[in-house]
Image (tube, grey):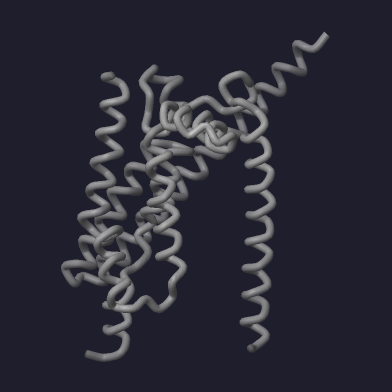
Amino acid sequence: MSLDETQKSSGKRFKILIFSIIALILVVIYGLIDPSTSHFFPKCPVKSLTHYDCPGCGSQRAIHALLNFEFREAFRQNALLVLALPYLTLGVFFNLIKKPSENMMRWRNRLFGHHATLIVLGIVIAFAVLRNVF
Amino acid sequence: MDINEYLKLQTPPKSYLIESILVTVFCCMPFGIIGIVNASNVESFYKNGDYEGAEEASKKAKRWMIIGLVSGFVFGTLYFLLLMADAFLNFD
């Protein structure tokens, strides 16, 4: 391994370390404190301005519920987030593969290709509309 | 087909779909949705064989994703600072 590569990988490791520490702190904060009873969690700017629920509204409460294993409550607060988590995890997994096999590329294109992306867009917009109607 | 073209065929440029969805749900919905639209552009260009267009769209998707991320972060920080200032000023 050349010096340049070594520096690059240690820089990456440092990034991962910082990222993990921040993630851990957030998990502890969101696990212990209920965002709906504390004032110290940022309110959604869209909701503050328009009084409509945006697709992200309730995600802090949903995370709090998920961290306390209250799946029904999490779903009630933000169903989109709960449904998106497995999909996002899969996406991260696909992004990590450096040299995918042909079969894997086919699945990647099915799940994250052009049509899939448009479906995601449709779901987000439909969710935004429906949650304000019902 | 030369090797570079083959490699391009194997892996489309990063569409930032995952990041854009995260921005939509956690930071700032409008910019996140622009990010998802750009992600679909990346895949669309790529599918039609326009690799330069796909690269261009990928850069654009990244830009909007970062704008969303930063605006969400700035808003969250400002909110927290204002609350702290409020708590500090009303402390007696």
Residue A23 at what x, y percent from top left?
Answer: 63, 48
- Residue lying farthest to the bottom in this orientation: B2
Residue at 25% from the left image edge and 54% from the top image edge: A116
Quarter of the figure that contains the N terminus of chain B: bottom left
**Where does the image place residue A32, in percent across and percent down from the top left?**
67, 32
Residue at the image point whose x is 65% and y is 28% from the top: A33
Q: What is the quadrant of residue A127 in the picture?
A: top left
- Farthest residue in the left direction? B48
Asked if B81 appears above or below B13 in the picture, the reply is: above
The answer to which of B75 and A116 lies nearer the viewer is: A116
Which residue is at the far right?
A: B92
- Looking at the image, residue A106 lies above or below residue A74: below
Q: Left or right: where does residue B87 sit relative to residue A108?
A: right
Quarter location, residue A90: bottom left
Q: Residue at x 31, y 65 (%)?
A: A108
Pick the residue in front: B57 or A111.
A111
Residue A2, percent from left and from top? 64, 88
User: Is A48 located above or below residue B58 in the figure?
Assistant: above
Residue found 58% across the figure and 38% down from its top: A67
Total number of numbered discs in the rendering: 0
For the C terminus of chain B, the quadrant is: top right
Would residue B3 be found to the left or right of residue A67 on screen? left
